[in-house]
Image (cartoon, coloured by chain):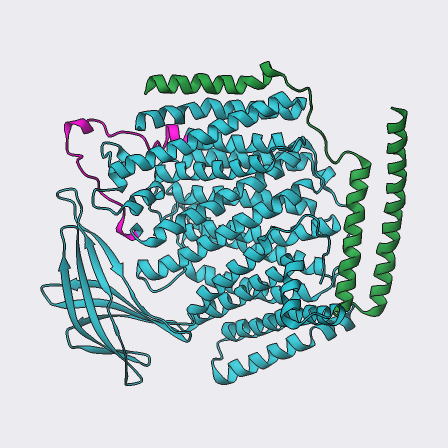
């Protein structure tokens, strides 16, 4: 099967090149024959890539260990779903997975636009073909997952090394696919943006078409980032959920620019403004996904998450530079056509608030990018690799985040076009009063930590604005249409999913910020303990009771038991464990894994990670962390997902009603 | 396996070439928004939507009565202008169709 897959992958190269030139020809000549031929080429390409992925999964399941990829990432003892997940567990497979998702998106795109005869669409396919060609080249010449191990037939490859134990977790099955769906999803808006620039069709058609695509990509990026945070928290055993690691930053940067676009595109749709800015955001979001992948996959920045690095940096850098040059070139070429005839009516308008929110979001993306590439730049300029790490990010991103949080509340409360100062005073009366109350209560009863007080104050402000927006909308419906409360609420949301779904997303953001604020009070300590020995951390006392060792041919599990007292009252037990996964390759050392124990509550999490067990000394090293308010992050994430789903909910075409 | 692959290549090549030798249609791709009627209709819809949003902002107390009056008058004026242009464009289009 790997031979057929290899053949098909090779055939995809001329097919992609054909689709690229045929689509240009279709756009240039406007002949439907060329367009149809492009669609057929793309259909064949998509089928072949799907087949390649299916065949690779087949190889992983059957256990063809003479193939380098199968040998490296599976072994005979791995459960079936991890064998399937190994498709994206390593470098070469993840690149094929990337291409497969792109093809999946393209299949949907082509199906949706099968009757589209506009001159824009061929150039969309041109851009996507270029991306496909790049990935096929990468797979064929730098990272072929179907490569076999030379001389493997001589023996010694009866079993594989197996997937990294850190990846043998259910998150592995859902986190990378959602992140990739987000990353790759940015290709479609980029393709439409490029098509608009190439064809010169710079009206709002392309913007309307990409709104849902961008939202889809943003949705999956959000889920991917949240699952990544949850994975880090539950599996990596370091006690946190976000470390400003380059891999995390790579996924965060396009999320920020896509968030900016989702706000500013509303202004283009409503006021026909910010055309250049929106185009820049679309191009930038895709370029940032490439930059992030280049930074983390090339190995030029080190990351604890880089499970898949190899020598593909040169390819990515070349493609990245080419993408920047071509997209910026076309942008400059079409700049005059993109200029807007409309201007802002007032500085006190929702347009201005959105613009400010955009500047802060893009500023945040630039700050993250700078922090990520700084070690590379410092090494290139001064010859010393300086890692700036979380202190830099926390210092820069906390104020930026707080400004964004505040704007989350301000934007929706201001009218489109123009608001007077008097009106602003009236509109913001209750939210400001709520914010002051929260500020006082936090300072008196909880903390005087300036960032936390500010965060809670702004959270109170935003919550009040969301409440008021819903309240006013419901009241208008109840009064004007004589609807009951629940009917008015449901219809309010259904009549304007974008606005009221967006507020639910904002509510999720508020909960996320409450969760982030808890990090200011995080307490952590590592202890060396013998059985029966007790220690104290904050209001918790814990005693190491015993350790049980469970040995199987594939792994050794060391499960410790702790008794916990809270304020000297019996509270709970904890069972953190350390696992040593035996390699199936003779002579290879076992790979360690951690099974953390988390006692969750809405106030704080009590977190135990067993770091090591010294059998000779009969002592353990354990990390204990008290993590306040972490649960709000996961609940906030759920609201963010719920709100986005409401916004994405299909709207009947006939509906024209915009407001409540 | 090689034979299967050769068959796939031949079948794909025929598929790609099929639109050229079948020549079922002489249709061309079209510039969907090049026509002024489409452009003006879109402008009109945007302006009507702006009026609805302004009304809602006024009802929810985000716009003062004075601002509401002046903004609504301004958007209404623009809408009337666009509708006049649209009427003219429609008439021109009908005239052209009749002459054809």
Vertical position of residue A150 compared to residue A487: above or below:
above
Is residue A293 shown above or below A659? above
| Residue A209 horizontal/vertical position (percent) | 63, 42
- At x 73% / y 49%, what residue is drawn? A273
Q: Quadrant of residue A527?
A: bottom left
**Image quadrant of residue A357?**
bottom right
Q: Which chain is cyan?
A: A
What span is colored magenta in the figure? A138-166
x and y percent of residue A159 in the render?
A: 19, 39
Query: Which residue is at 78% across, 68% downward?
Result: A420
Residue at 35%, 37% (x, y): give it. A92
The answer to whether residue A584 is left or right of residue A270 is left
The extreme top residue here reads B21
Placement of B99 over or under A184, stated as above or below = above
Q: Residue B37 vs residue A451: left or right? A: right
Q: Can see residue B14?
A: yes
Residue A144 magenta = yes
Q: Colour of chain B?
A: green
Main secondary-structure element of the magenta-colored stretch: loop
């Amino acid at each position: 099967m790997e031979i057929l897959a290899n053949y098909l992958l090779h055939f995809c190269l001329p097919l992609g090149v054909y689709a690229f030139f045929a689509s240009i020809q279709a756009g240039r000549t406007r002949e439907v024959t060329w367009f149809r031929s492009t669609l057929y080429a793309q259909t064949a390409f998509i089928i072949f890539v799907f087949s390649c992925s299916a065949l690779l999964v087949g190889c992983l399941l059957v256990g063809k260990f003479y193939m380098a990829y199968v040998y490296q990432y599976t072994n005979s003892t791995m459960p079936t779903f991890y064998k399937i997940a190994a498709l994206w567990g390593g470098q070469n497979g993840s690149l094929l997975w990337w291409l497969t998702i792109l093809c999946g998106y393209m299949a949907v795109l082509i199906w949706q636009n099968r009757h589209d005869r506009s001159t824009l669409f061929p150039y969309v396919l041109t851009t996507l073909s270029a991306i496909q060609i790049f990935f096929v080249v990468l797979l064929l010449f730098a990272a072929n997952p179907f490569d076999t191990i030379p001389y493997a037939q001589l023996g010694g490859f009866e079993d594989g090394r197996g997937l990294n134990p850190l990846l043998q977790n259910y998150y592995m099955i859902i986190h990378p696919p959602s992140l990739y769906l987000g990353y790759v999803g940015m290709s479609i808006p980029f393709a439409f943006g490029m098509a608009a620039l190439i064809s010169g069709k710079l009206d709002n058609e392309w913007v309307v078409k990409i709104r849902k695509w961008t939202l889809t990509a943003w949705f999956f990026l959000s889920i991917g980032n949240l699952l990544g945070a949850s994975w880090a928290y539950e599996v990596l055993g370091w006690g946190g959920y976000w470390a400003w690691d380059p891999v995390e930053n790579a996924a965060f940067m396009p999320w920020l620019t896509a968030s900016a676009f989702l706000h500013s595109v509303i202004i283009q749709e409503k006021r026909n403004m910010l055309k250049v800015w929106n185009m820049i955001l679309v191009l930038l979001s895709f370029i940032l996904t490439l930059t992030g992948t280049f930074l983390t996959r090339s190995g030029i920045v080190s990351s604890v998450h880089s499970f898949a690095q190899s020598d593909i940096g040169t390819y990515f850098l070349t493609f990245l530079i080419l993408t920047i040059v071509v997209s910026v070139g076309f942008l400059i070429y079409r700049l005059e056509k993109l200029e807007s005839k409309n201007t802002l009516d007032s500085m006190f308008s929702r347009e201005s608030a959105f613009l400010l929110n955009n500047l802060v979001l893009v500023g945040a993306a630039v700050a993250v990018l700078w922090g990520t590439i700084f070690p590379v730049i410092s090494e290139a300029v001064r010859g010393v690799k300086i890692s700036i790490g979380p202190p830099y990010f926390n210092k820069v991103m906390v104020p930026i985040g707080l400004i964004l949080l505040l704007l989350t509340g301000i934007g929706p409360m201001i009218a489109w076009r123009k608001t007077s100062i008097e009106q602003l005073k009236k509109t913001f009366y209750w939210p400001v009063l709520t914010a002051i109350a929260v500020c006082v209560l936090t300072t008196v009863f909880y903390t005087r930590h300036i960032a936390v007080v500010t965060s809670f104050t702004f959270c109170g402000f935003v919550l009040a604005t969301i409440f008021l927006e819903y309240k006013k909308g419901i009241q208008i419906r109840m009064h004007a249409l004589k609807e009951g409360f629940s009917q008015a609420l449901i219809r309010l949301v259904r009549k304007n999913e974008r606005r009221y779904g967006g507020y639910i997303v904002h509510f999720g953001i508020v909960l996320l910020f409450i969760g982030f604020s808890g990090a200011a009070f995080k307490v952590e300590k590592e202890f060396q303990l013998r059985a029966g020995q007790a220690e104290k951390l904050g209001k918790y006392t814990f005693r190491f009771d015993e350790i049980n060792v469970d040995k199987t041919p594939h792994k050794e599990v060391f499960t410790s038991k702790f008794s916990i007292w809270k304020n000297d009252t019996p509270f709970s037990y904890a069972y953190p464990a350390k696992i040593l996964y035996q390699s199936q390759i003779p002579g290879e050392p076992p790979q360690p894994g951690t099974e953390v124990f988390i006692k969750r509550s809405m106030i704080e999490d009590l977190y135990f990670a067993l770091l090591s067990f010294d059998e000779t000394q009969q002592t353990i090293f354990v990390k204990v962390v008290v993590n306040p308010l972490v649960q709000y992050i996961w609940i906030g994430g759920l609201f963010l997902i719920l709100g986005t789903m409401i916004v994405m909910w299909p709207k009947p075409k006939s509906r024209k009603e915009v407001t409540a | 396996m090689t034979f299967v692959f050769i068959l796939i290549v031949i079948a794909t090549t025929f598929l790609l070439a099929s639109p050229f030798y079948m020549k079922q249609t002489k249709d061309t791709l079209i510039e969907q928004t090049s026509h002024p009627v489409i452009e003006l209709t879109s402008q009109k819809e945007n302006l009507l939507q702006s009026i609805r949003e302004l009304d809602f902002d006024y009802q929810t107390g985000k716009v003062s009565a004075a601002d509401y009056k002046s903004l609504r008058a301004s958007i209404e004026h623009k809408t009337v202008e666009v509708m006049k242009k649209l009427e003219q464009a429609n008439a021109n289009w009908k005239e052209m169709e009749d002459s054809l």
